Amino acid sequence: MVKDPEAYKTIKVPAWVYINAKEAELALMRKGVGRLPESVLNPTKCPICKNELNTMKIEESGGKTYLLCPNCGYTQPKFEGTMEGIALGTAIGMGLVHLLNTLFGNGRQAQPEAGTG
């Protein structure tokens, strides 16, 4: 796990990706998170390797709580409450969690490819 999971990284994405991500952000703000699967909001198993996730509070990140896989290092914030004021990064992160669940959803022990874990 990175020392400060709230540290920002800049990535370049095509305009269509950015537009779709903004639409997802707006939809989450309008509709809330009630329709999202529990595997995205409150996962108990790592979407990559299926190990149990540990809960960890990180003081360097303002006391935020994260879910951490002790096997492969997968990390995500613990999504709590109504999540008012959802940011674009949160919307993208939720989409990535769902994508990882789909890609690694066959239940076998998979190791992340280089650079993904």
Image: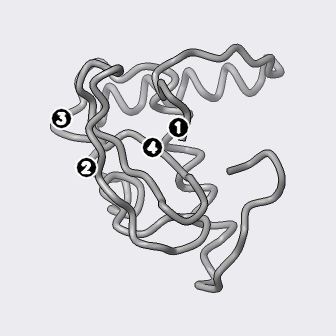
- Nearest to N terminus: mark 2 or mark 3: 2
Alpha-carbon neighbours of circle 3 within 10 Å: few (<14), some, or many (≥20)?
few
Front: mark 4 or 2: 4
Q: Which mark is residue 76?
A: 4
Q: CA distance from mark 4 to mark 2?
A: 19 Å
Q: Position of residue 44 (x, y in %)?
A: 34, 67
The reply to whether callout 1 and callout 4 are in contact (CB within 8 Å) is yes
Label 2, label 3: how far apart the Cα atoms are: 9 Å
Residue labelled with disc 2: 34
Secondary structure under the numbered disc 2 in the rendered image: loop
Mark 4 in CB contact with mark 2 (< 8 angstroms): no
Q: Residues within 10 Å of mark 2 (few under 14, many from 20)?
A: few
In the displayed image of the protein, which residue is found farthest to the left? Answer: 81
The amino acid at mark 3 is Thr
Which residue appears at 59% of the width and 71% of the height?
Answer: 49
- Residue 52 lies in quadrant: bottom left
Residue drawn at 58 percent across, 84 percent down: 107
**Residue 74, numbered label:** none
Q: Amino acid at mark 4?
A: Gln
Sequence order check: which comes first, mark 1 or mark 4? 4
Q: Which mark is residue 82?
A: 3
Name the image quarter holding the N terminus.
top right
Q: Nearer the viewer, mark 3 or mark 4?
A: 4
Q: Give the CA separation, mark 1 to mark 2.
A: 17 Å
Q: How busy is the neighbourhood of tag 4: few (under 14 within 10 Å), some, or many (20 plus)?
A: many
**Which of the two labelled residues, at mark 1 and mark 2, occupies the earlier sequence position?**
2
- Callout 1: helix, strand or loop? helix
Quick check: 24 above or below 109? above
- First in residue order: circle 1 vs circle 3: 3
- Element marked by disc 3: loop
Q: CA separation, marks 1 and 3?
A: 17 Å
Residue matched to label 1: 93
